[in-house]
Image (spheres, rainbow, N blue to C red):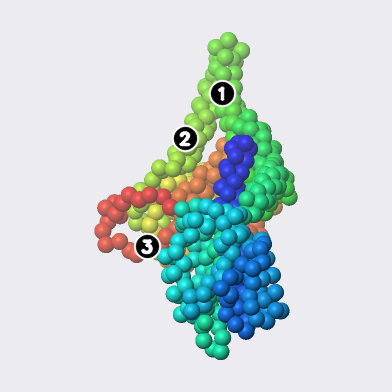
């Protein structure tokens, strides 16, 4: 992966460097050509100025002095400067230089230019020179690149003026290579500079990518540990850039949650195993005792009753586990209907009258409004009511009191199950809805499965409602909410409708 990233980044840098180098090369090339043509134009203007300030015209024999110097009659100082200037341009550019006036007099360095580069002189086009002369005598400055037989050439032309009138023209023609010479050296410099940039960029990219991928490697190792079942792996949240630090924090949060899930799974398996083993061990022991004659025959009815009780407890545990499993499925549905919650509370009391009478518990149903209609899954809400009532009966002493109440608050109905029993210890309040948790924090036979409140909370979550433990001075009180509904126009058994859970 590291090699692929490096290759992609370096390829992008290389393409960018080549493009930038090409742009740089073209820019520098054009700038050099413009600078040299500007220089030639400046030299031509100087020659034109000197030619315009001679006392008389050009001599009939302009090549009195060899070495390509111009020779003029008239002012000696001006003539010397003009010759020196022309000689300088010839030496620097190997140029053909011509001074022409309106009378048709021409002075040039054609013999010297021919001796140095006859092919260049022979390739000069008289028609091109005539066209250029016409433009210059009209007062224009020209700068032309043309393709001659011996290769491309540059022509620079400027007029020279005397007494406000254009009286002649100065032409300088040279091979394009004289103007463009030295560009190879610039190209080499650009290539070397580009190579240096690529090397430095490669080093910088290597160090940068390695610094980025190093924490990623740690994350890969941590992910491997998680895949092997070790959820204690953590990443350093201070390493890497800000984005990677965010990823590290998210990763650590994920591993913490996975660790909690794994701990919950192990605890669940341990609790289920314990809860199943206890009644099964009792049933097996009693059955073997009766079969082996260890338990006298006259005691068999007593122990058969114990076996039946343990079987009933085992069946209850299995039913609770199945109920929890069904409720936690993503496709679990609610069979919604409108019904009177007060009537359900009264029916729950009737179903538990035997247990209430055995403990002489005073029970009351105190609805604020009667009837109180709600929209919910009737069967599952009845399961919640029965579980909460059973809980209250279990932890309320003899001659205790239990109250079932309902009231309407806005668009919700609140149902409360309150008792004056032993209550819930402060340290147990946060765990009361955990699976298999019992108030004595032990999973011993006869104390229940510890799944009832978990099932109740899950049912309320499916309804999009809440179930909570209230703060009380004595005993315990649980309150859950339901969607309040208007009184139905039809009998309750006709109001059932199917809907997905919230």
Q: Is residue 280 above or below residue 188?
A: above
Q: Earlier in the sequence, mark 2 or mark 1?
A: 1
Q: Is residue 21 left or right of residue 84?
A: left
Q: CA distance from mark 3 to mark 1?
A: 46 Å
Nearer the camera: disc 2 or disc 1: 2
Residue 449 visible within the image: yes
* Identity of the residue furthest to the bottom in this view: 163
| CA neighbours of label 1 inside 10 A, class few (<14), some (14 to 19), many (20+) | some
Name the residue beneath numbered marker 3: 485
- State the image coordinates of residue 20 (x, y, percent, origin top left): 58, 54
Nearer the camera: disc 3 or disc 1: 3
The local secondary structure at tag 1 comes to helix
Residue drawn at x 69%, y 38% is 218
Name the residue beneath numbered marker 1: 280
Q: Is residue 386 left or right of residue 500?
A: right
Judging depth in this view, the residue of 67 and 265 nearest the camera is 67
Name the residue beneath numbered marker 2: 322
Check if mark 3's residue and mark 1's residue have beta carbons within 8 Å. Answer: no
Q: CA distance from mark 2 to mark 3?
A: 31 Å
Q: CA distance from mark 2 to mark 1?
A: 18 Å
| CA neighbours of label 2 inside 10 A, class few (<14), some (14 to 19), many (20+) | few
Residue drawn at x 70%, y 74% is 80
Residue 353 visible within the image: no
Judging depth in this view, the residue of 46 and 424 nearest the camera is 46
- State the image coordinates of residue 135 (x, y, percent, origin top left): 45, 75
Judging depth in this view, the residue of 297 and 113 nearest the camera is 113
The local secondary structure at tag 2 comes to helix
């Amino acid at each position: 992966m590291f090699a692929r990233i490096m290759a992609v980044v370096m390829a992008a840098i290389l393409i960018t460097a080549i493009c930038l180098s090409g742009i740089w090369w073209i820019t520098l090339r054009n700038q050099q050509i413009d600078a040299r043509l500007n220089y030639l134009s400046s030299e031509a203007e100087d020659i034109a100025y000197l030619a315009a300030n001679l006392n008389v015209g050009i001599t009939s024999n302009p090549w009195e002095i060899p070495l390509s110097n111009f020779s003029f009659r008239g002012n000696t100082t001006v003539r010397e400067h003009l010759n020196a200037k022309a000689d300088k341009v010839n030496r620097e550019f190997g140029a053909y230089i011509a001074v022409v006036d309106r009378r048709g007099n021409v002075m040039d360095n054609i013999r010297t230019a021919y001796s140095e580069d006859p092919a260049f002189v022979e390739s000069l086009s008289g028609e091109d020179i005539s066209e250029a002369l016409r433009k210059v005598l009209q007062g224009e400055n020209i700068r032309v690149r043309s393709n001659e037989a011996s290769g491309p050439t540059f022509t620079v032309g400027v007029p020279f003026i005397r007494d406000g009138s254009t009286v002649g023209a100065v032409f300088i023609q040279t091979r394009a290579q004289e103007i463009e010479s030295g560009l190879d050296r610039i190209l080499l410099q650009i290539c070397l500079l580009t190579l240096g940039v690529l090397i430095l960029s490669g080093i910088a990219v290597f160090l940068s990518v390695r610094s980025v991928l190093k924490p990623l490697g740690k994350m890969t190792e941590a992910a491997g540990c998680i895949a092997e079942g070790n959820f204690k792996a953590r990443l350093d949240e201070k390493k890497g850039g800000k984005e990677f630090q965010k990823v590290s924090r998210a990763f650590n949060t994920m591993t913490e949650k996975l660790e909690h899930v794994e701990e919950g799974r192990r605890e669940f398996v341990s609790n289920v195993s314990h809860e199943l083993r206890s009644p099964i061990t009792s049933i097996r022991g009693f059955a073997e005792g009766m079969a082996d004659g260890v338990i006298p025959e006259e005691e068999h009815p007593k122990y058969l009753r114990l076996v039946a009780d343990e079987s009933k407890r085992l069946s209850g545990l299995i039913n609770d586990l199945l109920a929890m499993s069904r409720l936690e499925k993503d496709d679990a549905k609610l069979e919604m209907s409108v019904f009177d919650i007060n009537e359900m509370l009264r029916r729950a009391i009737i179903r538990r009258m035997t247990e209430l009478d055995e403990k002489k518990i005073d029970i009351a149903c105190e609805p604020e409004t009667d009837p109180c209609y709600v929209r919910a899954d009737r069967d599952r809400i009845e399961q919640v009511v029965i579980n909460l009532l059973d809980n209250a009966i279990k932890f309320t002493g003899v001659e205790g009191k239990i109250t079932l109440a309902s009231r309407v608050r806005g668009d919700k109905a609140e149902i409360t199950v309150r008792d004056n029993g032993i209550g819930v210890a402060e340290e147990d309040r946060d765990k009361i809805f955990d699976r298999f948790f019992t108030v004595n924090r032990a999973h011993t036979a006869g104390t229940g499965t510890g799944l009832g409140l978990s099932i109740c909370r899950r049912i309320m979550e499916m309804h999009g409602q809440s179930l909570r433990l209230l703060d009380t001075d004595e005993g315990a009180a649980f309150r859950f909410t339901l969607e309040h509904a208007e009184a139905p126009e039809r009998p309750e058994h006709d109001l059932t409708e199917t809907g997905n859970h919230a």
